[in-house]
Amino acid sequence: MKMGKIARQKTIPAVCAEIVFKAAEPVYGPEDIVYIWDQQFSCVSENHFPAGFFKEFYRQILFKLPDLKSDRRLGIIQLFRCICEASGFRNSPECNEIIREGREFQQEQGFTQWTEDYPNIDVIRSDVREGKGYAVKADGKIAGYLCVDFGGEPAYENIRGEWRTEEPYAVVHRLAFSKEFRGIGLSKTTFDLIDELCLSKGVKGIRGDTDPCNERMQHVLEKNGFQKCGYVIFQDSDKAAYDKIIR
């Protein structure tokens, strides 16, 4: 079945078909898209995408289509795979809003790692100016923000413990996701992309730190291949130090 034929079907908007096939080929075929659309979104008209459409589409694919073969599921998940790209100055306010949401999310969990002074929009603009500020994009929207620094971190020279990684290494700081995109698996996708970015530069080690009270971030790090190495002093306080060897 050819792309043109699918694009003309009434149940699939042409714009969706174009996105699907551009990203999907050659991992899976049109029949899978027809199946997903008919099962999950047959009520959506051709000219209207409801609010939160792509987020729900992503969620449905990840968690509610176990009957698809594993290679098919992998291909479909990659359909809306995020891209990490250098964050321009015009995006700084959006990225700062995500940081603000992250700060509030920490407070809801009963601790304060980020304050009004750090990180703030000036820090983000500095990241961008130095080429280490990245926006995580999903469905064309900024879903997250992070700093990936290949220049090292002076605070990591003194660790109470021992790093497993050697120089050169990348440092991940200021990772936060928009509340609109939490809980749909973007942290794994983002760390996969960070791995690719590192390998493209010949770097095989990543380091990071987080507040000892930030159990959620520690879980995210450990789930994505990081191991706790000890403690460092960063921003005048003790942080749990983690690193990852990219295999």
Image (cartoon, helix red, strand yellow):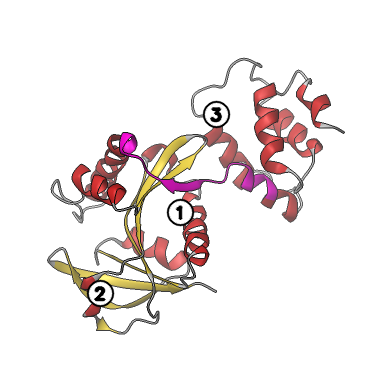
> At label 3, which amino acid type do we have?
Phe
Q: Which range is magenta?
A: 75-91
State the separation of the CA atoms marked 3 and 1.
20 Å
Instruction: Give neighbour class at mark 3: few <14, some 14-19, many 20+ (Cα, 10 Å).
Output: some
Q: Who's the residue at 24% across and 63% down the image?
A: 213
Where does residue 60 sit, x and y in percent of width and height? 61, 39
Q: Disc 2 marks which amino acid? A: Tyr
Q: Secondary structure at mark 2?
A: helix
Q: Which comes sooner in the sequence, label 2 or label 1?
A: 2
Rendered location of residue 239, percent (x, y): 23, 69
Residue density around tag 2, few if under 14, some if 14–19, many if 20 or more, within 10 Å: some
From this view, report whether residue 44 is shown above or below residue 209: above
Label ID, residue 102: none
The alpha-carbon separation of the residues under discs 3 and 2 comes to 42 Å
Report which residue position mark 2 lands on: 156
Q: CA distance from mark 2 to mark 1?
A: 23 Å
Reading the image, the residue beneath label 3 is 53
Task: Name the residue nearer the viewer: 105 or 15.
Answer: 15
168 relative to 193, above or below:
below
| Type of amino acid under label 1 | Ser
- Frontmost of labels 2 and 1 is 2
Residue at left offset 51%, top offset 66%: 199
Q: Residue at x 37, y 78 (%)?
A: 167
> Residue 243: horizontal and vertical position, in percent?
38, 73
Which one is earlier in the sequence, the residue at label 3 or at label 1?
3
Q: Residue at x 64, y 20 (%)?
A: 44
Instruction: Determine which of the numbered discs, if any, sits on residue 187 in the image.
Output: 1
SS of the residue at dot 1? helix
